[in-house]
Amino acid sequence: MKQHRYRLTVDHLALPDGSALTPPRSLQFEAGNHDDILAIVERMRGRGDLPEADATALAVGLKLFSEVMLQNRGLPLFADFAPHFKAFMQQLKQGPRTTEGN
């Protein structure tokens, strides 16, 4: 399957108490995805139901996870979760829910 290719870098910036890591730690890896992750991030940010940083993290995390699940769909690891994930993705794609009176 043809895929977009991405290089992801995660830099551990601080400990929970706010102190810096000594030495600093980071992780870099490459991943493929059948979708344009950057376009999906923009759509998630445009929904307006999450702060921008949360929308970005959700979009990237979901796309990385879903691609691994798709490529390994025959594994028992994903068997029980797959129907729930599908339902979640369908709901997500419908757009943000609005509540009357807000």
Image (cartoon, rainbow, N blue to C red):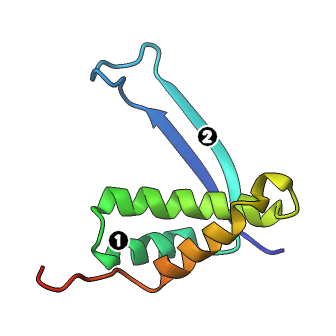
Q: Position of residue 2 (x, y in %)?
A: 80, 75
Dots 1, 2 in contact, CB < 8 A: no
Q: Is residue 27 left or right of residue 20?
A: right
Q: Nearer the viewer, residue 9 or 16?
A: 16
Q: Residue furthest top?
A: 22
At a point 46% along the width and 21% down the height, the residue shown is: 24
Residue identified by numbered label 2: 28
Number of the label disc, if any, that sits on residue 56: none
Q: Amino acid at mark 1?
A: Arg
Which quarter of the figure has residue 78?
bottom right
Q: Please, is residue 88 above or below residue 81 in the view?
A: below
Q: Is residue 2 left or right of residue 27?
A: right
At a point 26% along the width and 83% down the height, the residue shown is: 98
Q: Amino acid at mark 2?
A: Gln
- What is the secondary structure assignment of the residue under circle 1? helix
- What is the secondary structure assignment of the residue under circle 2? strand
Q: Position of residue 71 (x, y in %)?
A: 81, 63
Q: Please, is residue 1 above or below residue 100 in the view?
A: above
Q: Nearer the viewer, residue 35 or 82?
A: 82
